[in-house]
Each structure stands twice: as structure tokens, then as C-alpha cells.
């Protein structure tokens, strides 16, 4: 289910879909008009595009909230990019926004990709979609084919099916996969060194980020800043799930409070906490629901915007149990590159599961906190850090429950089905050897290739 606000200025990304319920090129152009694509080599218009992006204050909508203009500036400083990689992987189980974007407004995403590619002098665009997301792959492949051979496709586009998995959507993993290498995250202490695909620099953008890029190029930075708040302008897509009647993808103004968003979705019970930022995010207690949805405000309560996810927990669900289920899932999504993932995350998940069932001892919290200290900052990528952030927030937000469980009193709801979806439904089974069963980094399939000269 997709739910948006009531007018184009406050829900611009999804406005064409709401108006016509069509995703084809003619409906897209009728609603938005043609994108102001510079001619290849037109430095003046490319500079104008870069300045507009800088003035807009757009930050990446994929998880890190990194300034989009800074990525563009970095690549331009080294002579441009060989490849623009579009991240449509939807690797967070609690997210649906990439699915909505690629099936409802794929041409807006492609506009942003082509604008970025021309500004950087890139030779190709690679659209990455998870291998098991066949509907999205089919929709975006159709959209790319509609544009082929025309003025809206100056840069060739490959639609690539990449093996799914939680870490597969991390930008360094995706750049590796786009270049035919194992799609696993890499350690990047210096973000001023650009990613690469093959031997050329590359830029990786989330699908939603590029949709905003397309709108900023059309309407300008002042229009973009007219929504949201000064330190977090624009709108964002948020997937709301859990204990609410109206689950779906919402387009909200940045700065909207968590309470406003949650109330609009009609909770099914008394809200005890919300998981913000996805499985690598953090639990926020009900007492902090007046926190605005911005990177800075959420950081003050220990959370992150992440890829735009809010999971609502009510008094009908055990927070420690849900946390144990998430930790179990994250342990199984390791790329198997380092000890903190391979050994630390399964141990944390096991402790949390024993705690939820009332089978842990009184020193369980102290033991978990020691594990957190050993894991944080020692991984080959940020995956273990996110898992620890989520688990540590649970011990704080659900402190009373944790204490009761440690005393041998499991929650009455701990055996109920998860509100987090099918990815975490399985009971704890433990993890022995390499737990990354879903990650198949060597498998890749090119679904289609369309160039400016193909029909």
C-alpha cells in the first residue's frame, strides 16, 4: 500500500503516480515535462546542474545521509565518473520504497541517473536490482527500453540483477558487483577516495536520491528547500510497518515528527517504541515520539534516518524478542569477512534470545555490553556496528523488560509471530560456521542493455 500527502508540492516524488496511476514514459512526461539534460560536453549546463544540487542541500536517501553534491564534487575533481550505479536493491527487509519507486515512478529515477551521468561525463549507467525482485526488474527494464534511442537516454543503461542480501546494498559492495567482482563491502577509512567500477571512478546513488535530483534539476533548489527544515530540506519516503492499521510507503516532509507519522498510520495498541532507521538503526521510546525526522534530531536520541524505515511496536509485542529476531537475522547476513560478524553477531543474538525466553542469568546485560565493546569499530564494514546500535538501544528502551526476563520471567508475547515480517519469523536455531547463507556474491545477470542507438 502506498500512501502520500495531498498535493504535488508536498509529495512530489510520487505525484505522477498518484495523478494517473501510470508508470509509462508518456504519463511521466505529461506530468513532469522533459528533464533539462545538458548535451554531452556542455560544461556550462553541467556546472549549473552541480550548483543547483549544492544549493538544494539534498542528502542521500539510502542510509548515510551524505550530501549528494559532495559526491558529485568529488567525482568532478578527479575528472568525472566512468559509471553511475543506481542502488535499487531494497536490502532492508522492513523497506518497500525502492519497490514503489521502480514500479510506480521509474522514469523519475532514470532522469536523475542520466542527469548525473551527463554532468560527470560517465560512459554508462548501471541499474542494480535484487535478483529476487523480479517485478521491479521487469518494470525498470521496460522503462529503460521506452527511452532507448531517444534524447532522454544519452548515456547507455544496463539493468543488472544482483544477488540480494542485507549487505549487498552497501555502496562499496554494489560498486564491486557492478564491476563483476564479489559483491561484499570494503573497509573505507577515507571517503574522499572515490569508488570504482573496473578501472574508472564510479558514483553510487540510491534510487530515491536520484528521483529528487531529477526534480531539483527541473524546479530548482529554492523549490526543494521550500519543504522540510533548513538543516534537512525536501521530502523523503518512509516505509511504516509493525503495529499499525495503515502500513505503507509515505512521502513526508523532512522534520515531520515521529508522532505525527505514527498517528497517521493508526497504531493498533499503545505504542511502546518505534524502530527507526531499519535493522541497523535504533529503538526510540514512545516518550521521544516528538522527535523530528531529520538526521540531526534523530542522532540526539541515538537513532538514524537510515533508508527511511519506521517500525511501530505496541504493548502487544515483546521488544526484547523482536530485537533477538533482528539480531538473529543480521547474524545470518554477514559477508563472512571478519570475526566481529562471524562470531560476535551470532553470540549477541543467542544471548538476546535466551534473555527473551527468560533463560538467561542476571549478568546477561553485562555480558552483552562486553560483547558490544568487542564488536563495535572492529568490523571489515559497518554491518556489525549497526547490529550493535540496534541491540544496545533495545537494552535501554526495554530496560524494565530486560530486567524481568533476566530474572526468569519471559514476556507473555515472546512466542507470538513477529511484526517485522517474514525475514525474521524463523525461531532461533543458532549459527555455527559461516552464517551468510543468502549472500552469493559471484552470481550476476545482465537483464538488459539499452544504448542511445538501440530501439
Image: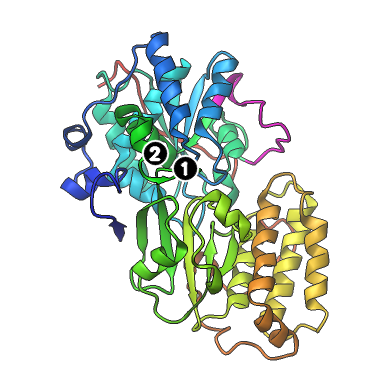
Q: Residue at x 73, y 90 (%)?
A: 408
State the residue at coordinates (38%, 9%). Answer: 42
Relative side of 261 to 333, left or right: left
Residue 150 location in percent, x, y? 24, 19
Per the image, the residue denoted by label 1 is: 230
Q: Position of residue 355 (x, y in %)?
A: 71, 80
Please give the range of residues in magenta.
Answer: 184-202
Helix, strand or loop status at disc 1: loop
Using the image, determine if residue 391 lies above or below residue 295: below
Tag 2 residue? 225
Q: Quadrant of residue 29?
A: top left
Would residue 138 be visible to someone looking at this image?
A: yes
- Whether residue 429 appears in this view of the structure is no
Q: Position of residue 410 (x, y in %)?
A: 65, 88
Question: Mark 1 near mark 2, Cβ–Cβ under 8 Å?
Answer: yes
Residue 196 falls within the magenta-colored stretch: yes
Local SS, label 2: helix
| 95 to 56, vertically: above or below | below
Residue at the spot x=53%, y=60% of the render? Answer: 276
Q: Position of residue 330 (x, y in %)?
A: 63, 60
Mark 1: few, some, or many residues within 10 Å (few <14, many ≥20)?
Answer: few
Q: Nearer the viewer, residue 212 or 165?
A: 212
Q: Quadrant of residue 56?
A: top left
Amino acid at each position: 500500500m502506498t500512501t502520500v500527502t495531498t498535493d504535488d508540492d508536498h509529495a512530489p516524488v510520487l505525484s505522477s503516480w498518484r495523478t494517473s496511476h501510470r508508470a509509462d514514459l508518456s504519463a511521466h512526461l505529461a506530468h513532469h515535462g522533459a528533464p533539462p539534460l545538458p548535451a554531452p560536453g556542455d560544461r556550462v549546463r553541467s556546472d549549473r546542474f552541480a550548483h543547483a544540487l549544492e544549493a538544494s542541500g539534498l542528502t542521500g536517501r539510502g542510509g548515510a545521509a551524505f550530501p549528494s553534491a559532495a559526491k558529485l564534487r568529488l567525482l568532478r575533481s578527479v575528472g568525472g565518473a566512468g559509471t553511475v550505479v543506481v542502488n535499487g536493491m531494497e536490502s532492508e527487509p522492513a523497506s518497500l520504497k525502492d519497490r514503489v519507486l521502480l514500479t510506480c515512478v521509474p522514469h523519475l529515477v532514470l532522469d536523475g541517473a542520466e542527469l548525473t551521468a551527463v554532468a560527470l561525463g560517465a560512459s554508462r549507467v548501471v541499474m542494480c536490482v535484487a535478483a529476487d525482485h523480479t517485478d521491479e526488474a521487469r518494470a525498470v527494464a521496460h522503462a529503460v527500453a521506452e527511452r532507448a534511442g531517444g534524447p532522454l537516454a544519452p548515456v547507455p543503461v544496463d539493468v543488472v540483477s544482483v544477488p540480494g542480501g542485507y549487505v549487498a546494498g552497501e555502496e562499496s559492495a554494489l560498486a564491486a558487483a557492478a564491476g563483476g567482482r564479489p559483491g561484499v563491502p570494503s573497509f573505507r577509512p577515507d571517503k574522499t577516495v572515490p569508488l570504482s567500477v573496473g578501472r574508472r571512478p564510479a558514483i553510487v546513488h540510491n534510487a530515491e536520491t536520484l528521483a529528487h535530483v531529477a526534480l531539483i534539476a527541473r524546479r530548482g533548489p529554492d523549490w526543494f528547500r521550500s519543504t522540510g527544515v533548513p538543516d534537512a530540506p525536501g521530502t523523503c519516503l518512509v516505509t511504516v510497518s509493525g503495529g499499525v492499521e495503515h502500513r505503507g510507503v509515505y512521502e513526508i516532509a523532512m522534520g515531520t515528527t515521529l508522532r505525527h507519522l505514527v498517528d497517521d498510520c493508526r497504531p493498533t495498541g499503545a505504542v511502546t517504541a518505534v524502530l527507526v532507521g531499519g535493522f541497523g538503526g535504533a529503538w526510540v521510546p514512545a516518550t521521544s515520539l516528538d522527535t523530528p525526522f531529520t538526521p540531526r534530531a534523530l542522532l540526539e536520541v541515538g537513532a538514524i534516518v537510515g533508508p527511511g524505515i519506521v517500525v511501530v511496536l505496541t504493548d502487544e509485542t515483546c521488544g526484547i524478542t523482536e530485537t533477538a529476531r533482528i539480531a538473529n537475522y543480521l547474524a545470518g547476513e554477514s559477508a563472512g569477512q571478519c570475526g566481529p560478524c562471524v562470531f560476535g553477531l551470532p553470540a549477541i543474538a543467542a544471548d538476546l534470545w535466551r534473555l527473551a525466553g527468560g533463560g538467561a542469568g542476571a549478568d546477561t546485560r553485562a555480558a552483552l555490553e562486553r560483547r558490544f565493546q568487542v564488536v563495535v569499530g572492529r568490523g571489515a564494514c559497518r554491518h556489525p556496528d549497526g547490529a550493535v546500535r540496534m541491540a544496545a538501544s533495545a537494552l535501554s528502551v526495554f530496560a524494565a523488560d530486560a530486567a524481568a526476563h533476566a530474572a526468569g520471567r519471559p514476556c507473555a508475547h515472546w512466542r507470538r509471530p513477529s511484526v517485522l515480517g517474514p525475514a525474521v519469523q524463523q525461531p532461533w536455531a543458532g549459527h555455527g560456521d559461516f552464517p551468510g547463507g543468502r549472500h552469493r556474491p559471484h552470481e550476476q545477470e545482465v537483464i538488459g542493455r539499452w544504448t542511445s542507438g538501440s530501439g
